[in-house]
Amino acid sequence: MTNDPSNINQDQEGVESTIVSEKQSDQGTDLSRRTFFKRFAVGGGAALLGGGATYAAGSASVEGRIAKDYPETNEDFKPFRQKNTTLSYAASPVLAARDNTRMEQFKKLHDKPADYFWPKLFQHFEHNVPYDNSRPGFTQLDGALQHASWMPWANWSGPKGKMLLFGGTGVPNTPPYTWDQSDKHENKHQFTDAKEAADAVRSAGRLFGALRVGIARNDKRWNYDPIYDLTQDKELSWEKDFPFKPKSVIVMVVPMDYDGMATAPSRVSAATAGIGYTQMAVLAGAMKHFMNGLGYNAVGAGNDLAISGAYGIMAGLGEGGRNNCLLVPGYGPRVRICKVFTDFDFEDEYDQPHTWGITEFCKSCKKCADACPSQAISHSTEPSFYPDHERAKEPGYNWSNHIGVKKFHTDAKRCVDYWLETDSDCGACIASCTFNEPDFWHHWFIMAINPFTPKLIHGLMAELHPAFGYGSTQNPEKVKKFWRTGEGMRVNKHNKSTFGTSNIS
Amino acid sequence: MELAQWFCFGILFTLMSAGLAYLSIKVKLSWWVWGALIISCLLILFGLAWAGASFLEGVAQSGAIALICFSGPGILAISWIWKRYIRPQAANLSS
Ligand code: SF4
Ligand code: SF4
């Protein structure tokens, strides 16, 4: 620059203007930094609030809504006679021999050989078909697992010891589900109020291994009446034979392993159900003794005494599905149900039937019916008061259906027939169910939005379930996958047993 | 271990919010472009979170499809918005 004074002025002005513009730019930077943080805070805060509200809405949604319209029954409805359950008939040689017309009819309608007789097969159920080591799911390895899963039942000694393997058929008063009340404490424990009692019972159930615990009133509509003991071929009355007058039914569900059930139909899925039965016995047995210890009468039950699915619905644990299972939010039908009848009165703490839009979803989804290898599951769009399966119109064919209650009816005879044919208890309708999911957030998300999604979307969701890789059946790869689920179990850092997944792709 | 996923997505979400806030002081966009941009970002995060959970549960197919169905459209939408509305104002981004 020059020494010219005018230039000096100019320079001074230039310096001044540089200083001003730097100041302005600093102010601008400060301003934009401030704006950035402000927007970041406001935007982030709004997003957090939105996320929180969405989470709260989702949590409320998975609580379900009270289902005021359950159950819908008509004039033909009455309590079900246990003698008429398919399993009672299939497992009782006396009953089947006495009323052979049912077997004859089934043989005739389904092209069975002349000497075909369910009870003969049922006596050795799960031991009828030799192992096939070339067929994944039916090898000796798979069979050993299947038989071991029922061990406590199979080994119980006593007059009904031999029949304990058939405990799942609904035989009452067996050792785990004994009617004996001799260990009832003489002092009746007094709770402060019914809420404290219900909380205590639910806490005990949780400790004993229950996934969910609901409490329903004793309801004659769902109790088998009369009860049937196939080991004695004897019908039993609630009034004369049962040890007390029940007031309440504690309903508990135990989860079944996701990867085990995914192998259906196989001996591994049968093992998954088998260990579920064993856990039911432990859970209901422990709860019965807990109630006895508090000074109240109690009897545990597995498949005996009452229709478990209906009690599950009455206790607010889930909804009835097309596959005739209780569909529990978060698990679908991948649960087993046990009950404890007690004379304890829970007053105003009883649970009520709830809906999550599951039965509604079933109207658009027929995945279980498609997967059923014996075509036992209805493809009808709407539930009905009467069975509408293929043979439903044949005279006398529906003896095992509970008519007069609106639901999806199945042909359980075909189901049992398939079990006997494959020597396993199948489970394809559980594995394929759109609501059968491992315990991860995205499945809960779908569960939460389900009640708000229109029918059209239900159909799409049902189609996307297999497209996303869930619910396939008759898949040997699933058996191979199951047998690798033990990897990493020393530390089990993914909590596989809790999340119900193998974490192996 | 599964809960670690939530922590990671918390960080990703924070970064996304910061990115959008930065963009908001650098470029001028109409309200609906902002809406599309935010939805696209959420879609990408949703797909990633779904995929993470699917890989953890061992159903890789579900994760892959989630990335295609949710994150994919999100990425496509952001690319389009970037090209059409943000790149013309690129000079502002570095200033
Ligand atoms: S267990 Fe198998 S045969 Fe029976 S209803 Fe379910 S899918 Fe059908
Ligand atoms: S597979 Fe579909 S139709 Fe069948 S019980 Fe599950 S949700 Fe209902």
Image: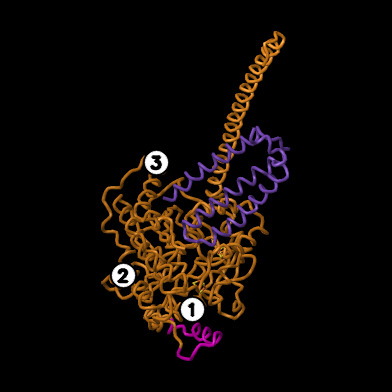
Chain colours: A orange, B purple
Between A124 and A396, the one lying in front of the other is A124
When the figure is inspected, residue A235 is found, relative to residue B47, above or below; the finding is: below
Tell me, yes or no, whether dots 3 and 2 are on the same chain.
yes
Quadrant in the rendering for residue A19: top right
Q: Which residue is mark 2?
A: A151
Residue located 41% across and 61% down the image:
A338
Residue located 55% across and 50% down the image:
A64
Gap between marks 3 and 2, in whole Å? Answer: 40 Å
What chain does mark 3 sit on? Answer: A
**Residue furthest to the top:** A5
Tell me, yes or no, whether dots 2 and 1 are on the same chain.
yes
Q: Is residue A222 visible?
A: no
Between A50 and A149, the one lying in front of the other is A50
When the figure is inspected, residue B12 is found, relative to residue A151, above or below; the finding is: above
Is residue A481 toward the left or the right of residue A187 in the image?
right
Q: Earlier in the sequence, mark 2 or mark 1?
A: 2
When the figure is inspected, residue A160 is found, relative to residue A313, above or below; the finding is: below
Magenta residue check for B92: no
Q: Which residue is mark 1?
A: A418
Magenta residue check for A103: yes
What chain does mark 1 sit on? Answer: A
Between A306 and A484, the one lying in front of the other is A484
Which amino acid does the dot numbered 2 rest on? Met
Image mark for residue A186? none
Q: Which residue is mark 3?
A: A193
Give the structural element (helix, strand or loop) at label 2: helix
Give the structural element (helix, strand or loop) at label 1: helix
